[in-house]
Image: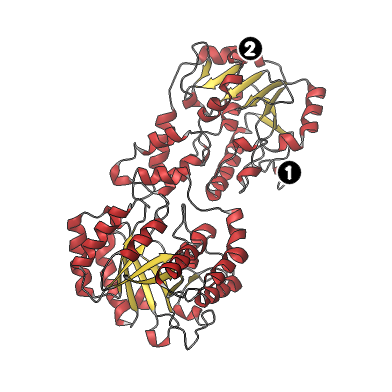
């Protein structure tokens, strides 16, 4: 068996989920429990030049860890921290020498265009006495020539360990072993090999098992985290891999302290901000692109999986490794836009809506909880009712507005086409469909460019409507199950992106309020007079 060491990165990689705000006591307890589990190497967090916050696992100096790490004299556990060039940076000249440090090593990550800088910094780290872990981001994107050139420099540097990093989560077993063999045959024998996986294809566990079976005389370090906590699809689960090692190689990892971390500290985080495999992350890996592209498209709530796949395939190869919000939004809008001349259609709508009280009903959860408010409003005002992307079961709408291709697919069989208006991005419409120009209704904000709730309001303005009442415009909560009146409308969405979408919609509503007087019938986070109520 290859000599395997386990490195736990819960407090560092896991911090992408909660912005590293674990809490001071939680950080101490996580470090204590991981050490108690007999984990070989523990990563405490990032080293950064940003102002220190005791509640985060980001530190402005190794001295901050003196009161947090409690080393047992008999323990062989190694403690490390990460410096990430271009992301969480601390110039290594700011590091204390190893003699005054509670940690043993520094993990240094760098992109291909930062290699020269990385080697300058690496030498400083070594000179200060730390064990140096060299971790190039996205080693799957290196050509063999680039990789061999890098290994030559690594051999001259002689770090403690050199890592294979599957940043995009695209490695199958054969891909991993190919790179391992390339490294093992060209790396100085004194240098350990490390492996950091992402679980986009749910292969982190099986790939780790493959590494345990690979025959080499050198040590191999495998990264994992409690419950696999980490950005996007997450990482290899510490508890799974520890149990596997115990049962197959007679190691003595104690899984229970890790499970205690999961139960006490990570489960509440997961409820608010879930991580782990989903089909969108698979699509990112299948298209060899950054997982944030899929997250961004998923958060729009407008696209089917085939549509997301189609858009991901249009990302230029040179732009796939790093998330480019402007690029993906441009591709998305190009995919959606199908410009038409809708002057005649808008003229008919203007005539139909002239002089009428308008009520727009969106599918927010409040339309179920506050149904009596809506029915009372309808009884008192006899409005012209427009529903957005759904057909209410408690009232008959005069018109259904469809601006979302995914929702159209879900309710197409129930729609009365003669009483429906579609935006021109919707595919496969019947020949007698009433269609308005999508390109004139989308919004300037990336994060809410295609909000159907905003697009119908812009259409009302375009048709000279001056006021409208709104119901079901709740806004997005972190829990996908709390966003819609019907659980079928929900999904797993990045909570950070949903929050950005809330802010963007709020700005759009504020901009539209100069042209359209808006009254909220049900509670909404967008209603300044009703903040916080859902």
The location of residue 132, given as percent across then percent down, is 32, 75
Q: Earlier in the sequence, mark 2 or mark 1?
A: 2
The quarter of the picture where the N terminus appears is bottom left
The location of residue 70, given as percent across then percent down, is 52, 83
Residue highlighted by disc 1: 530
Instruction: Tell me the crowding category of disc 2: few under 14, some 14 to 19, or many 20 or more residues within 10 angstroms, Cα based.
Output: few
Circle on res. 351: 2
User: Could one spot residue 47 in this view of the protein?
Assistant: no
Circle on res. 20: none
What separation in Å lies between label 2 and label 1 (alpha carbons)? 33 Å
Q: Nearer the viewer, residue 33 or 103?
A: 33
Residue shown at 54% from the left, 59% from the top: 18
Residue shown at 82% from the left, 24% from the top: 380
- Tell me the SS state at disc 2: helix
* Residue 160 in which image quadrant: bottom left
The location of residue 348, given as percent across then percent down, is 59, 12
User: Could one spot residue 4 in this view of the protein?
Assistant: yes
The quarter of the picture where the C terminus appears is top right
Labelled pair 2, 1 in contact (Cβ < 8 Å): no
Residue shown at 49% from the left, 62% from the top: 14
Specify whether 506 is left or right of 241: right
């Amino acid at each position: 068996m290859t000599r395997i060491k386990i490195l736990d990165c819960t407090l560092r990689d896991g911090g992408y989920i909660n912005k590293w705000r674990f809490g001071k006591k939680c950080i101490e307890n996580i470090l204590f429990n991981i050490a108690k589990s007999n984990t070989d190497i523990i990563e405490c967090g990032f080293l950064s030049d940003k102002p220190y916050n005791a509640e985060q696992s980001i530190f402005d100096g190794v001295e901050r860890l003196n009161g947090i790490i409690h080393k047992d004299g008999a323990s062989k556990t190694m403690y490390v921290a990460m410096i990430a060039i271009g992301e969480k940076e601390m110039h290594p000249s700011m590091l204390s020498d190893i003699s005054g440090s509670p940690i043993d090593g520094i993990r240094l990550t760098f992109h291909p265009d930062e290699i020269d800088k990385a080697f300058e910094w690496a030498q400083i780290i070594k000179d200060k006495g730390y064990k140096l872990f060299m971790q190039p981001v996205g080693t799957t994107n290196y050509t063999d020539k680039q990789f061999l050139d890098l290994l030559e420099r690594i051999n001259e540097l002689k770090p403690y360990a050199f890592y294979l990093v599957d940043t995009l989560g695209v490695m199958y077993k054969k891909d991993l072993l190919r790179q391992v063999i390339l490294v093992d045959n060209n790396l100085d024998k004194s240098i350990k090999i490390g492996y950091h996986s992402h679980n986009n294809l749910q292969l982190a566990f099986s790939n780790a098992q493959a590494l345990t079976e690979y025959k080499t005389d050198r040590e191999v370090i495998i990264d994992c985290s409690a419950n696999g906590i980490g950005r996007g699809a997450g990482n290899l689960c510490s508890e799974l891999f520890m149990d596997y090692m115990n049962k197959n190689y007679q190691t003595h990892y104690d899984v229970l302290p890790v499970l205690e971390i999961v139960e006490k500290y990570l489960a509440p985080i997961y409820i608010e901000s879930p991580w782990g495999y989903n089909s969108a992350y698979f699509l990112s890996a299948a298209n060899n692109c950054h997982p944030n592209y899929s997250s961004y498209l998923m958060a729009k709530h407008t696209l089917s999986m085939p549509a997301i796949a189609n858009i991901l395939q249009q990302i230029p190869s040179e732009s796939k490794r790093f998330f480019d919000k402007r690029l993906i939004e441009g591709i998305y809008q190009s995919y959606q836009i199908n410009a038409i001349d809708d002057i005649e259609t808008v003229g008919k709508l203007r005539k139909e809506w002239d002089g009428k009280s308008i009520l727009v009903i969106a599918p927010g959860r409040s339309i179920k909880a506050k149904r009596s408010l809506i029915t009372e409003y309808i009884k008192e005002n006899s409005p012209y009712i427009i529903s957005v992307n759904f057909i209410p079961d408690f009232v008959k709408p005069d018109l259904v507005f469809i601006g979302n291709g995914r929702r159209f697919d879900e309710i197409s069989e129930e729609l009365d086409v003669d009483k429906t208006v579609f935006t021109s991005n919707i595919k496969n419409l019947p020949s007698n469909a009433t269609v308005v120009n999508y390109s004139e209704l989308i919004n300037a904000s990336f994060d809410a460019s295609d909000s159907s709730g905003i697009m119908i309001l812009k259409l009302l303005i375009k048709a000279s409507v001056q006021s409208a009442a709104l119901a079901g415009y709740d806004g997005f909560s972190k829990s996908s199950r709390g966003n819609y009146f019907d659980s079928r409308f929900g999904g797993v969405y990045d909570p950070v992106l949903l929050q950005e979408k809330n802010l963007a919609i709020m700005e759009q509503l504020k901009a539209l309020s100069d042209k359209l007087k808006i009254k909220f019938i049900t509670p909404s986070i967008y209603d300044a007079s009703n903040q916080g109520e859902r």
